[in-house]
Image (cartoon, rainbow, N blue to C red):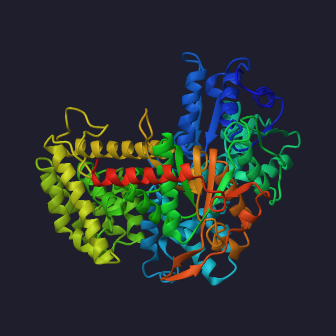
Amino acid sequence: MHGLNPTQIEAVRHTGSPLLVIAGAGSGKTRVITHKIAWLLGPGGLPARSVCALTFTNKAAREMRARLGRLLPGRAGRGLRVATFHTFGLELLRREAGAAGLRTGFSLFDPADGETLLREHLHDHPLAEAVTPAAALARISQWKNDLIDPARATAAAEDDHEAALAALYRDYERSLRAYNAVDFDDLILRPVALLRMDAARREAWQARLRYLLVDEYQDSNGAQYALVRLLAGPRGAFTVVGDDDQSIYAWRGARPENLARLRQDYPDLTVITLEQNYRSSARILALANGLIAHNPHLFPKRLWSALGPGEPARLLVCRDETHEAERVAGEILHARLTQGQRYSDCAILYRGNHQARPFEQALRALAIPYFLSGGTSFFARAEVKDVMAYLRLLANPADDTAFLRIVNVPRREIGPATLERLAAVAANRGVGLLAACADLALAATLSERPRQRLAALATCLATHARQARTAPVAAIRALLEAIDYPGWLHQQASSRAQAERRTGHVEELIRWLDDLAQRQPAGPRQRSARHPGQTGDQPRDLGELVAHLTLLDILERQDEERAEAAGDGTGDGPGRVNLMTLHAAKGLEFPHVFLVGMEEDLLPHRGAIEADSIEEERRLAYVGITRAQRTLTFSRARQRRRYGETIACEPSRFLAELPAGALADADQQPADPAARRARGQAHLAALKGLLGTP
């Protein structure tokens, strides 16, 4: 219990009833959860395998496991579950596949796979011109998060459009069943359905998990709430930690009212509130408390800090978005050159990704390194995923997920009904989808034309798979030429420039593959150093090459996640300035924060103003403020370019809601001649550095 305050200790030791911990920003919630797990496994007397902690992100799960590794001696934590909701759901489904209506080895569709499947269903569909695959998938996800199946969605439809979407949902689910596949939302929905239906399995899981802990509970949706209740059972042996003031994910199904539902469903619920903040100065917290006081509260609280008053927050009022970016970049450079401030200590937070570009330009102009959160990973690009799927099939013809990705890329007019019948034959024969393409049993369920298309695809892949055994790079080049994949990219692109970029990504991947095959490590962006995933002995056959690329994909994403969290500021180096949206900043903290674009229609966002959902936008601003540890600077522009014209900007209402006198206007403060000279010298030094002059 060393280092915990009395309220935190109370939360750690409480096990007599269900517990809700209202944890304000920076109040040490992860410390409470990890110490409680250590207490449960020590004085609490529970075996590690009977305790489960659920989070919403891989990053949070990794951090929790790392802290527990330092708290728990030796093998004390062996068997402990610390996972995201979806990872836990996947584990449950793998254990209970048959009972959940799945076959062993079921496929997991990512959102891109789901959109591909819906695109096929939308072909020649009445909704084809009215809805995109992404929008349809988002609506289906909403239904699944609310535990609504296709039949209920159809019954509740209020108009023809909603009824058509519900029918599309039904077709989508039928295809998933035929393919022995689940999507991301099914990892919660299917466990809930199974545990509701099967009392014996529900009781077995409740006996297996004797204590449950859940982080960021305000971000839970309806399905996740139901899963927690089913796992906790009537004993209610759980601790959930959340903060209604930090609920900013309603757009993806989060229900902050789940915190209030706990009181209704568990009358003996104990509520403990953590209000001491260990992150920010008193002045920053005064701003946060003053702003969020304008929202209604489920659980009132007021953050306080023992870290001292700190520096006053400032407001930069700028001419336009270019001037705003230049001023922020100048502030960061000035602090670096005059105070030795690390770039990685700085974060520029904004409401939408489109606001990043001027800041990127301004930072580049001053040679300031930066990390842009939310950039597209090389392996996440659709064209790279397509070619990787073809590579996976050449190496492993039984890879059904890869087959489903490329079966209509380029378009071969192989529709969902054909694929469902193919899947039925494959399941009956106990073979993969590609192998079933040439099965004579298809004649009983498919007409000659679709059988010919399937057979042609199978023959094409088999031909190039044989070539790939001895010449993998030549084989993939020949395959892409045979199917005219470059032509497909040009057909699908919105412009010639986009088509050329996508073609370039494909060429880059193939060059990388060639380098690996020849034991000459390289990679996207022509890396000069060996990638962390590379070893001295490079892979030779196609299977090894594909496995190697897949590993590098995982490592690249992990590197990006680590860089996002820390700005890559390791050791004594300056690191990189962090650029990210307010949503991406949740859970992070930085010594110096610039909260930019404080204008109506940006923060709060225009869509929120029109939808009258200002409360969530206010919570978003609150999250931004509470990311700051030592200094906080707001900025706004008097005018911006929008839709090709210059528009006057109105200050954000949230600035007016801050406590009176708590915000210093940087432009109205008396000029300090010495500070002005130092700033000018800093800019001059930066320019000399850019020009390479002494």
| Vertical side of 285 occupied by 278: above or below | above
Q: Nearer the viewer, residue 591 or 662?
A: 662
* Residue 262 visible: yes
Percent x, y for residue 61?
Answer: 56, 38
Residue appearing at x 83%, y 54% in the figure = 297
Residue located farthest toward the front when viewing the structure as drawn? 673
Percent x, y for residue 545?
Answer: 23, 44
Percent x, y for residue 504?
Answer: 24, 63
Q: Please indicate whether residue 212 sits to the left or right of residue 678 in the image.
A: right
Q: Please indicate whether residue 275 sits to the left or right of residue 414 in the image.
A: right
Q: Nearer the viewer, residue 351 or 174?
A: 351
Q: Nearer the viewer, residue 154 or 43?
A: 43
Residue appearing at x 72%, y 21% in the figure = 1
Q: Please indicate whether residue 569 sits to the left or right of residue 243 in the image.
A: left
Rendering quarter of residue 81 = top right
Residue appearing at x 81%, y 56% in the figure = 293
| Vertical side of 191 occupied by 76: above or below | above
Rendering quarter of residue 212 = top right
Residue located farthest toward the right when viewing the structure as drawn? 267
* Residue 209 visible: no
| Vertical side of 612 occupied by 516: above or below | above
Percent x, y for residue 69?
Answer: 55, 24
Please state the total of marks drawn on the protein image. Answer: 0
